[in-house]
Amino acid sequence: MFQRTLVRIPGYCCISVAATAMAFSVTASAGQIGPDVVAFYVAESINYQGSVDGIGGYAFGTTSCNYGDIEAAWYGGTNETPLIGQNAYRLKNGRFEQIGTSWLKHSFCALSEGGCGDCQATDCSTLGIGCADTYGAGLNTNPGGPRSEVNAFTGAYDYPFTNSPSGTATLRGNLCIADDDIDPSLNPDARYFFEGFYVCTDEAPWGTQFNNASFREIGFSSVGSPSTIGPTRIGEMAIEAWAEIDPTVTLIEIMVPGDGMIVIGAKVTELSNGTWRYEYAIYNYNCDRSVGGVSIPLPAGANASNIGFHDVDYHSGEIWDGTDWVGEQTIGQLRWATTPYAQDVNANAIRWDSLYNVRFDLPVPPEDGEITLELFKPGGAPSVTAIGPIPGGEPVDPCDLPVPACAVDIDGSSRVDVGDVLQLIADFGTCGDGTFRPASDVDGDCCVNVNDMLTVLGEWDTECGEPGACCLGDGSCIQSLESECADAGGTFNGAAVPCFDVNCPVPGACCVSETDCQVLFLPDCDALDGDFRGYGTTCGTIDCSQSAYNDNCDESWLITTGSYEFSTMNATTDGPGHEECQFDGQTYNDIWYRFVSPGAGVLAVSTCDLVNYDSDLVVYDGWDCNDLQLLGCNDDGDGCSGYSSFLELDVTSGQSLLIRVGGWESGDAGEGTLQIDFNSSD
């Protein structure tokens, strides 16, 4: 459910979202919209740069459209042109979290293309009314604009920037995502979303800067192999997908007077043990003052457990700190907060276009109440509050809850022994009063008496402990005691840790040699100096005589006629350019195959209508990567849609060929099928 809300601010009364937004439109003429840039397409192209230390670098294409009735400023090389940001999100086990962020692309020269409206084209210093402008994944790779130098609400920034991104080109400024956050074997049933965001310099006077984000669902068949699912959701925030998919989620939109918008997502789930799990996602759309703290009221006597926090990691030299917030429970509230602005202006506040999560469990049912967001930067009211689901009912009497697992281990030593008897004697005669259950009440009657003593003595000298997540050898997870986990050959992740919060490692095929394949965990494969072929792979589907990936010419795969699925998402460009071929003569993000002609005739090499990107094909005579002899190339095959390719060549019997499959320009990469057909002339 998406709910508009009244914002309560000290010193103000009931400021509505609509009224606040109208207050920003101070120069708008009656009936006039002004410039209004939206992200019209997101991730039409996606570029994977590779992975460094478990972090992958990505970039995706964005196309803007001016929905307004005034030309939008696009003065390249100045501070009067839009900035383009990229985010990634994951929905897993009911939790919606941001898992990646990028630096900002500094745009230049709007082309005023058609395709999104009745385009009134202009020169490249403005984006015409009803016109589009495309930045492919290649152009959005390695962006150089720091988010910390931008006011996303007003669109103001200084140029040139004072801070530049640092680090390897694979990650520098790109959309950085941890491999473990997207590996399908570690994230079963997870769903992913890419979000593009345009910060425009001339929209704030018109109040049109609240539809600059658009998202698109993404699937990952493997790390580094993303693909799109469905169309771009124009003008919609990625967090809206959470509420659309899960009807138990409430979204609350807040407008901060004189500043931008914040959205709170809330989900409350009743668990099986008499408690409720409270999950909040706080998304700062474009509020420059940022969010420095979150407070949730708690009923008297209620004690929260499993208190958690999640944020997104900044990178490439961004100056903002990344210290996690710690949830602190005091009488009447649970609060998370970063270091105050007065102590550190670069503290880990929830900055614009960022989403953080706070969560906890509590034996109290929900009701509507006030959620408080503390604003980080000075300049107005110190906080805003919104109405949403909070723990508000009467606390559950602990004595009405089930007896904890292994209650006879009173002192927590994992064994029933004299320590438990001594603690029971100390508690003897104590009864709960509705706010607590005595620790030594092991039979569930809420009083410590002779029945509890007899129960403890009946379990004397037995091992006891609270179950936790146990990762088994096949990557699955069970809840078990530590000893039971060890007996099953698993890895115990700690008492009371649910499988919900654990990513169990999955074994895969390990090529120890060209003829020796074993299914091992990655560390065990590394110890044998083997070549790990991916989580969840099996030796039955892996050919260790072939290289792990045919990215380079000397790693080419031997194929015959038939159909071959492929991905160039991980591919680099290593082959030469050829002036005989189309565009600039280069084939980008290429992979390689070897082929031996079965006879004299015509060889057809095709991606025609079989790929999801703009492909190129090149064929060479011989297998010598140091002496490539061009036979033919094709960019766009006749009658082939989507800029796919088709190439026919006359070949002789036994002729050795190298086949190169790539993209038309840097960043053109994707997935598809390579079709090899041969027609004999004999």
Image (spheres, rainbow, N blue to C red):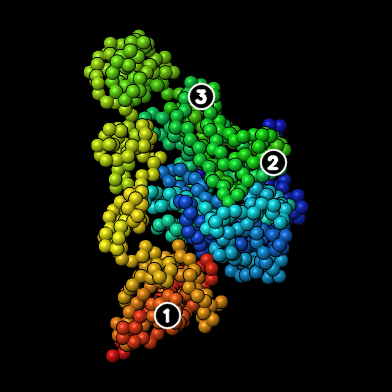
- The kind of residue on which mark 3 rests is Pro
Q: Do the residues labelled 2 and 1 touch (CB within 8 Å)?
A: no
- Which residue, as the protein is rendered here, is positioned at the far top? 429
Q: Which amino acid does label 2 sit on?
A: Pro
Q: Do the residues labelled 3 and 2 touch (CB within 8 Å)?
A: no
> Residue 155's x, y, as percent?
69, 52
Among the two numbered marks 2 and 1 on one chain, the one whose residue lies closer to the N terminus:
2
The image position of residue 95, as x and y in percent, is 46, 43
Tell me the element at label 3: loop
- Mark identifier at residue 89: none
Q: Quadrant of residue 655?
A: bottom left
Query: Between residues 235 and 619, which one lies in front from this camera angle?
Result: 619
For label 2, the residue is 257
> Residue under circle 1?
620
Residue 252 seen in the current view: no
In the rendered view, does 517 fall on the left or right side of 264?
left
Mark 3 burial class by Cα count in 10 Å: few <14, some 14-19, many 20+: some
- Crowd band around label 1 with a 10 angstrom C-alpha radius: few (<14), some (14–19), many (20+): many
**Depth order, front residue of 373/521:** 521
